[in-house]
Amino acid sequence: MSKYDPYDHLNISLNSDGSLTRYIKLPTSAAVSEAEAQITGQAVVSKDVTLNADRKTWMRIYRPAKLASAARLPIILFFHAGGWIQFSVANTLIHENSNRIAAEVPAVLVAVDFRLAPEHRLPAQYEDAMDAVVWVKNQASDRANGDQWIRDHGDIDRCYLYGVSCGANIVFNAALRLPEMRPQPLKIAGTIMNQPFFGGKKRTKSELKLATDLYFPLPVHDLLWELALPVGTDRDHRFCNPFVDGPIKEKVRNLGRCLVIGFGGDPLIDRQQEFVQMLVEQGVQVEARFDDVGFHGIDMIDTRRAAAILSFIKEFV
């Protein structure tokens, strides 16, 4: 196999029925109950809830173990990375990151285990995001039977959408759909996009310059889009390339506050900066945090970068 066989790089193979075999099995962690947290002294408790039984989607909710009785915490809906095709909110790496956000912001964090491609192609992931927003809205509104953590500890005026890589693409597309969904009384106070994953048929300078990037080479981008986009479409579809669709620019105006985070060694950096430019031109209030040094997904392996990103999120929220 050539050095840049994207299937080889991702450790996957495509089956004849269009599903994937994923050879990497990452360690997972269970949710931590209040009773367990008391015994072990953990700072954050968590629990799993069903989102949509028909779609087999679920969420893991986190909150600080110790709460001031009257305190209302911001609610953060979180969408993980994984190039559309892998990972779960139960993976230890993602679970521990969710713990940190809930403890340090502090917040009620709702981590959404959305459906994966290619078994479920876009817009399935956007639909799962909308389901999650509706779920939070319903819990907050139902004083008798709503989820206690959301109802008693969540601040429905400070709800944020936060996504990493493909998760950032999900929150962008979900945020565009919010006006037609009328999430009131839930108020989306901001959208946080960490290294958003966008693409297009025409290559950018950073994509060409970093085409053989160790972590995220160009053939891998192309394969991930091939596996995620609706069958028969290409990388200039609006789900992948938000710059080609006129109506998207109209909708962008309703986005509200945004935080966009990126790194200079990410092949996607040009697209991310162009994306920020588009938001600014449409009058969106954007905070852009770009660092010249760093690569796509650096925060998954560099604790210092992860801490820096967490401090940006904390400031923004």
Image (spheres, helix red, strand yellow):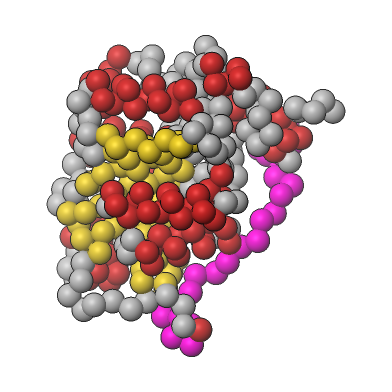
Q: Which residue lies furthest to the bottom in this view?
A: 39
- Look at 56% across and 27% down and name the residue there: 267
Can you tell which quarter of the image residue 35 is in? bottom left
Q: Where is residue 88 in the image (x, y as percent from the top left)?
A: 55, 53
- Look at 70% across and 54% down and name the residue there: 25
- Look at 69% across and 25% down and name the residue there: 212
Q: Seen in the image, is 96 located left or right of residue 221?
A: left
Q: Residue furthest left?
A: 185
Front residue of this view, candidates 86 and 57: 86
Q: Can residue 303 be seen in this view?
A: yes
Question: Residue 227 magenta-drawn?
Answer: no
User: Compared with residue 157, is residue 38 higher up or lower down, i.e. above or below?
Assistant: below
Q: Position of residue 92 (x, y in %)?
A: 58, 61
Q: Seen in the image, is 71 located left or right of residue 297?
A: left
- Look at 69% across and 38% down and name the residue there: 10
Can you tell which quarter of the image residue 83 is in? top right
Q: Where is residue 67 in the image (x, y as percent from the top left)?
A: 28, 76
Front residue of this view, candidates 71 and 273: 273
Q: Give the range drawn in magenta.
A: 12-39
User: Compared with residue 69, is residue 170 higher up or lower down, i.e. above or below?
Assistant: above
- Could you tell me which quadrant the N terminus lies in? top right
Q: Can residue 248 be seen in this view?
A: no
Q: Where is residue 3 in the image (x, y as percent from the top left)?
A: 80, 28
Q: How many labels does the image show?
A: 0
Question: Residue 35 magenta-drawn?
Answer: yes
Front residue of this view, candidates 17 and 77: 77
